Image (cartoon, rainbow, N blue to C red):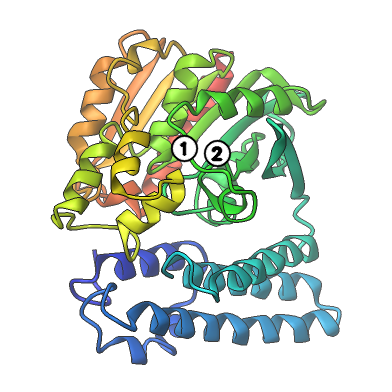
Amino acid sequence: MFQFYPGIYPWNLSIHLALNMGGILSEIESVSGPLAKYRSAAEPGAWTAWRQAWDEIGDRVQALGDKDAAAGHNRTAGKKLLRASLYHLMAERMMRVGEPEREPLYRKGLAEFRRGVDLMGTGVETVEIPYGASSLPAYFVPARTQPLGGAPGPCIVFVNGFDVNKEILYYRGPREELLERGISMLLVDQPGSGEALRFRNMPAIPECERWGTAIYDWVSQRSDVDPKRVGLMGVSLGGFYAPRAAAFEHRYAMCVAWGASTRFSDRLMRAMQQDEEAASVTDMLEQARWVFGAKDNAELVEKTRDMTMVGIADKITCPFLITHGINDRQVPASEAQEVYGDAVNSSHRTLKIFTEAEGGIEHVNFDNPDVVIDYMADWIEARFREI
């Protein structure tokens, strides 16, 4: 992958993500100057400089969007506000846990996102999925064309990984391809991610079938969704969450792991030994303690002990797709091969590892997501046609 900041993996990852989600290179480059002096994302002051730079460009683009909205150019305004939201969420994502600027920055990104999708007339619904004594925030995005196979139509539930949110799922994923094929999407901030973590104090749990069942129960009751054609997919650490949930909630019609993950505890051990070469955020252990609600590393190890698909993958009976990059530096491709090898009871299992000849060789193919998005969309459409 092209390295905008040599040796700073989380920053390079974030810039690739932003560009693939609708960011504009010239806008990003215009605020990148103050960042050039840093050699590590963990260097003192680095995360503050990152936040200030991306917040600045987000505010600038938001002002342009507000001007367009005042002139009645709603679609133009909506596009700019979505881009401003993206920049603000990229700023927040690299901040240290507990930084006072983090929450207001995240709320600003959420508000811009919601204004943007409304002004563009996307039909995106902001919904709440009952879960325990609270609920999970989500977006339902209706199919853009006639539902595949007729109404009610199929739906893919898309869940987060370690450090993303439902807005990023909207920007970066198979949304456009699936909506154009008559497949709706439900984008969810499950426990340990997005608003559920930040505003509702819901940490992640290994037993993700608990919320996986709650999500299925909710979406299957919609009049525009066929309960027999609801699939589940997850990205990055969601490549553990989605398969684990599907292994125990057999009403899901299919499962997609966009990047398999079966040995999360190994990554934590490497981080504790300061041997983690490709952490996706400024401080992986700090982020993990926050995500899992652990007071220290010992409790973190205990809470994540069951974050493995070993002894679980053979319980998956639905069609199961795993995609992975051959040069994934966060989760080795061997984990994808291991999960695939164990999923012997899947009715239609597929493993696709992307090579240099195809592109998309990095973690969840962030260096070239189009190749995997097309592959996943084709696979999902084919499986829904078989139901």
Q: Residue at x 55, y 73 (%)?
A: 88
Q: Position of residue 148 (x, y in %)?
A: 67, 27
Residue 348 to residue 47: above or below: above
Residue 112 makes an appearance in the image: yes
Q: Position of residue 86 (x, y in %)?
A: 55, 68
Q: In the picture, which quadrant includes the C terminus?
A: top right
Q: Residue at x 53, y 40 (%)?
A: 159
- Going by the numbered disc 2, the residue's amino acid type is Phe
Residue 113 to residue 368: above or below: below
- In the figure, is residue 43 to the left or right of 72? left
Q: Nearer the viewer, residue 140 or 144?
A: 140
The residue that disc 1 covers is 234
Q: In terms of image quadrants, where is residue 4?
A: bottom left
Q: Residue at x 30, y 69 (%)?
A: 12
Q: Nearer the viewer, residue 357 or 192?
A: 192
Residue 209 numbered tag: none
Comes first in the chain, label 1 or label 2: 2
Helix, strand or loop under label 2: strand
- Going by the numbered disc 1, the residue's amino acid type is Gly
Q: In the picture, which quadrant includes the N terminus?
A: bottom left
Q: Position of residue 257 (x, y in %)?
A: 40, 33
Residue 274 to residue 64: above or below: above
Q: Residue at x 31, y 54 (%)?
A: 285
